[in-house]
Image: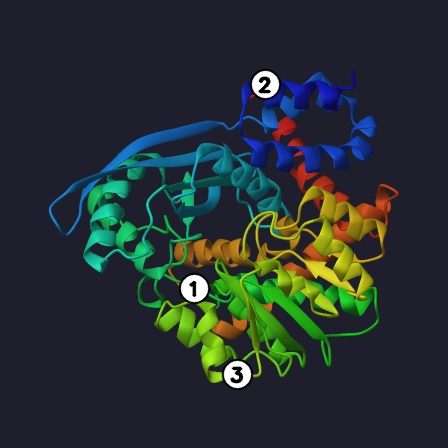
Amino acid sequence: MSYLSQVYDGLIARNPGEEEFHQAVKEVFESLEIALPQHPEFEQTSMLERITEPERVIMFRVPWVNDNGEVQVNKGFRVEFNSAIGPYKGGLRFHPSVKLGTLKFLGFEQILKNALTGIPMGGGKGGCDFDPKGKSDNEVMKFCQSFMTELFRHIGAYTDVPAGDIGVGGREIGFLFGQYKRLANKWEGVLTGKGLNWGGSFARTPATGYGLVYIAHEYLKDVRKTDFNGKTVAISGAGNVAIYACQKVNQLGGKVVTMSDSNGCIVDMDGIDLDLVKDIKEVRRGRIKEYIQKHPNATYSENRNDVWKVKCDVALPCATQNELDLEDAKVLAANGCLVVGEGANMPTTLEGTKYLLENGVGFLPGKAANAGGVAVSGLEMAQNSYFTQWTFEEVDGKLKGIMRNIWVNISTTAKKYGVEGNYVHGANIAGFMKVANSMMDQGVV
């Protein structure tokens, strides 16, 4: 049995029922089959066992009182996965689906994603099975204060720097930061995604969506010898990443024709009315179905995957994990899609990814394509350390440079290991090598 197979079988046995974590590790291991023969030192030092086991997992109860005076109890988590190249860095997710296996998958992905940015950040992830939807601001504040009352002792600007994720936006970050400052008795850049008045960074909100489009643009330019001008783009999701990816595509001359939420999707061949989507999702917190009330020529489907049935040049899955499957991949390839860029974390199934790669569709994996958000979080940390604030133009320029460097890194790494054009292998190997070599330098820790 090979070293990779031995480690993977052991991982499944030690982590039963954590399918998303298994999937994330399997994808990386498939890439490492190409690289490990050149690095026997990794097997000698049990590198794979070490890098797939979190350095620390923190679980805790979160008691809080709702507006009716009733005591509620949720389960909180922080997975501090790897700190070889910097403090743990990764988001907090507040959603009923949050469980340990999901956070381990996200934390493992975060290790390699953060390594690709070129900024010294380790990997981590956390969250709670709390659902902020339908809760009053007062209830969200009480919950966040209780959550941080436990978490604060485990984090810090040079230890672990959480950020937002699903269910954790500016409101939640504000409440969390206020409680941290109160308990720790110091102001520091311990959370990213902060308000612009109190340590936040310009361009942080659109960073993931913008970064996704920037790296897709690099692919179109270098590989297809074209750009976004005149291109038809299919986007899933209607949250932060999808909205700002749509905005940047529009600025570059493309036309976005689809968006979706958990209930269904809209198709507007005239081009998505982004102002209306923002009003529905960000102001009214409504459902995407409301779009067709003002645009009757658009169509609505309760099948979210219908976004991939529209003929498009570029597909950007920005909703959630495993939303683009094998059948969707077949339709995209048959319709002549040039490139799929992952705006969400692992939104394409392993079977879908394999089909796209084998059928000539460019594929930019999430750990590279959606790294723009954490990259600007890293820039926010730097600004906090200097007690300064850069302009939007400065941050956006740095973001473009980071995404360009990621593109060059994953494409040249793929070529170096004999799999030119396979950016999944390129991203996995490039990220892994940086972290593994750092761990080697630091001994068996």
Q: Is residue 278 above or below residue 350?
A: below
**Residue 383 as seen in the image, left or right of residue 39:** left
The one nearer the camera, 127 or 372, is: 127
The residue carrying mark 1 is 201
Residue 10 appears at what percent x and percent y? Answer: 63, 18
Gap in angstroms between the C-alphas marked 1 and 2: 43 Å
The one nearer the camera, 113 or 256, is: 256
In this view, the residue farthest toward the right is: 418
Q: Is residue 59 above or below residue 403?
A: above
Q: Residue at x 85, y 57 (%)?
A: 360
Q: Secondary structure at mark 1?
A: loop
Residue type at the position of mark 3: Pro
**Residue 391 as seen in the image, left or right of residue 5:** left
Q: Is residue 237 above or below residue 274?
A: above
Mark 1 Cα within 10 Å, few/some/many (few <14, many 20+)? many
- The numbered mark, 1 or 3, whose residue comes first in the sequence reads 1
The residue carrying mark 2 is 13
Gap in angstroms between the C-alphas marked 1 and 3: 39 Å
Residue type at the position of mark 2: Ala
Q: Nearer the viewer, mark 2 or mark 3?
A: 3
Q: Residue at x 35, y 61 (%)?
A: 170
Residue 204 appears at what percent x and percent y? Answer: 47, 63
Q: Nearer the viewer, mark 1 or mark 3?
A: 3
Q: Secondary structure at mark 2?
A: helix
Residue type at the position of mark 1: Ser
Q: Secondary structure at mark 3?
A: loop
Q: Is residue 245 visible?
A: no
Residue 443, picture quadrant: top right
Q: Residue at x 75, y 20 (%)?
A: 3
The residue carrying mark 3 is 296
Residues at discs 1 and 3 in contact (Cβ within 8 Å):
no
